[in-house]
Structures are given as structure tokens and as C-alpha cells.
Image (spheres, rainbow, N blue to C red):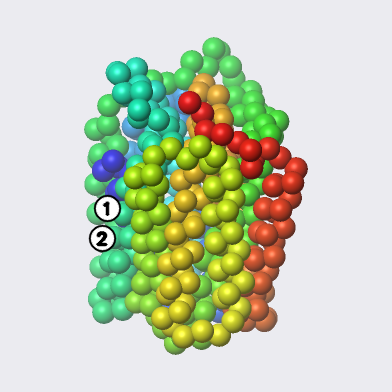
Amino acid sequence: MIAVSGWFFSFGLQTTLFPGVINYTLNESPDRLGIAQAALTAPMLFLLPLAGVVAERLDRRWVMGGFHALACLCAAVLSLMLFRNLLSYGAMIVYALLVGVAGAFVMPARDSAVNAVTRVAQRLGRPGFTLQRAVILASLVQFAAQILGMGAGVLAGRLGPAPLFAVQATGLAIGGAAALLMPRLPRQNTGGESLWTSLRTGVLEVLRSTILAPMTLIMLALGLLVVGGGFFVIIPVLVRDVYDGGYGMLALLLVAFWIGAFIANVLLARAGEVERPGRALMLAQMATVITMGLLAFPMPLYALFGLVFSWGLGGGVAISLSRAVVQENAPPRMIARVMSVYQLGLFGGMPLGAFVMGHVVHEIGPRLSSLIPMTGLLLVLIFVSLTTPILTLRRSA
């Protein structure tokens, strides 16, 4: 859990610092912000499927530890450049690309470990420790760490971003060390299968599934429209141009979202198993649709915080149940490959969404732009509900 906490604490801090530096330190335009945010996730578009194969073939401890070290080095160098007033837009792009590479390999290794740990626990006589419960508990750790990281980002307004990038590097170093100290988890037996064959079978497994394919489509819509467009561009520009805010306000807004997500998962953990997770997660996704639509209307700052908190409540349910549904419906022998393709939907859509929405926001402003992710996600949810068995899906025993 320390490995998970270290990564997501640093990720939470980065979520505030990265757009903050582009927006408030370098004072770049919305389209340049969109390009930089796209660079942060663009490597995942090309590397995630390969990373899933790597996670099944190599020791996951070394995969996670090595790429934590890469991200740690990047944050440390960026901190040093800020301290010496050497920072440039180009340096931020290089940082974004390298951290994107690290994230592409860390995610499938980490997420597939949850499945392996659950199977080990059940073999040791803990049948009540189900995969759905394990995913919810892992999400609680993730959300708590992200809240701490984003909360630390509030200090950027007073201390500047340089010392906080040093804090980010420290969190990554601790997470990487913890990953190396994890117990060895079993690797998948490839049966002499080539890397390319493993890659192809993982992709085909997702595309042929009546559950995994629509779940990945929803992730693609979220990455393209909501995270890439909304989180990465619309929210930071709205804070700067409409509410005249900076690092602190952006950090607090993001904290409000993840506090909502954390509370939602506490309630999920207390409620027990969700028997119809597909129906629940589709209803929860509607919180995102409603939020994106309401962002188009003027509102006082306190109402914006309340809206983002409510969005987090729905988002927290959707994130955890989506992960659980995918892991429950993926063949155990290719869980990392399936998870990498599923994550590719989200992180593959993010760079394109950030790039396009950056230009859209530059032309028509953040409020009107928010209607685009609202409409797009709503149409995808309606399509999936009408054409797949997602609403009738029951949890695995």
C-alpha cells in the first residue's frame, strides 16, 4: 500500500503543479496548456498495451521500482530548474513525456497486482476478501494519497512550485522503495508465446467481450472528453479566467473532487458487495454528465466547490466499480494485458482531448466548451446502455 500511496501522492501533487506552472508561472495560453497536458499522457497511447505484456512477464516489483525511479529523477530535475530560474515550456514538455512513459509501465503492473493479491488471500482462507472489495480498498488508499498530494499543492501559492516538485520526487522515491520490498507475486506462464502474440491476444480479448469492450469505450469517452478536456483544460482555465484564482484555488477544487470520491468509497466499503455493479456505475457516470453541463452556467465560487464535490461522489463510485467489473470479467492469465488496454481507453484519449479542447477553449471560452464533454459522454452512455448487457451485469461470486 505504501507503493500505491507514494505514486498517487505524487500524482495528486503533479495534478496541481503541472497545469499551475504552465498556467500561472509561465502564463501560457489555453492551447499551449492543452499541448503540454497532452504530452503528459501521449506516451501511454503507444506504450500501455506493451506495458501490460511486460507486467505479466517480468517481476512486477522491479517494473514498478524502476519506473518510480525515472519519475522521481524527472521531478527532482524540474525542481532544480525552478530553483535556478531555468524553467522553460520545452522543459515541461520533456518532463511530461518522461513521466508519461513511467506511468504507462507502473499502472498495469500495480493494478494487476490487486487481482493476484486477492487470489492469494482467498487461497489462504479469506473467501470474504472479494475482488470488488479489494479494488474498493485500493481505491480508498489511492484517493486518500491523492487528496494529501493535492492538498500539499495549495502551498505552491506561498512557497512556489520548486520545493513541491522536490516533495513529489521524495514521494516517488518512497513509493519505488516500497515496491521493491513487496512480496514476490506469481508471473503468468506465457507458454512460449511471443511478445507480439501476447499483445495481440490481449487486445482481441477486450474487443470481443460484450463487457470489456463497452467498459473500454466509456473510458475512451472519459479520457477524450472529461479528463483531457475538462480536468486538464476547462477547470484550470475557468479558475484563472473566470474566478481570478491560481495554484491554491485549483488545488482546493481538485481536493474537493477527491474528497467526494473518498467518501463515496468509504460508503461502498461499508455497504458491502454491489450486486449490479454495471447499473450502479452507469448511474454514477451521470454525475459527470450533469457536472459538465452545469459548468456552462455562471455560479458563485462556493457553488462551484459544491458541484465539484458532488461530481467526486459519483466519480468515486464509477472509478472503483469500473475497475472491479473489468478485473472480474478478464481471464486471470491475461489480467495485466486486459487492464492495460482498458487503461489505454482513458489515457489514450486524454492527450487528444487536451489538445483539441485547448484550442476550443481558446476560441469560445471554458463555459461554453463544457457542453461538448457533457453531450459526448451522454451519447456514449446511452449507446452502451442500449446495445450491451452492462445494465444487467451481476458481480462475480
**Residue type beneath disc 1:** Gly
Q: Residue at x 28, y 41 (%)?
A: 1
Alpha-carbon span between mark 1 and mark 2: 6 Å
Q: Residue at x 55, y 85 (%)?
A: 298
Left or right, residue 134 beside residue 83: right
Marks 1 and 2 in Cβ contact (< 8 Å): yes
Which dot marks residue 171? 1
Corner quadrant of residue 303 = bottom left
**Residue type beneath disc 2:** Val
Which dot marks residue 347? none
Front-lying residue, 55 or 371: 371
The spot of residue 316 in percent (x, y) is 45, 54
The spot of residue 233 in percent (x, y) is 55, 70
Corner quadrant of residue 271 = top left
Q: Residue at x 56, y 62 (%)?
A: 288
The residue labelled by disc 2 is 167
The spot of residue 38 in percent (x, y) is 56, 61
Residue 269, visible in the rendered structure? yes
Q: Which type of secondary structure does the marked residue at label 1 adopt?
A: helix
Q: How many residues crowd mark 2 within 10 Å: few (<14), some (14–19), many (20+)?
A: many
Q: Residue at x 49, y 57 (%)?
A: 314
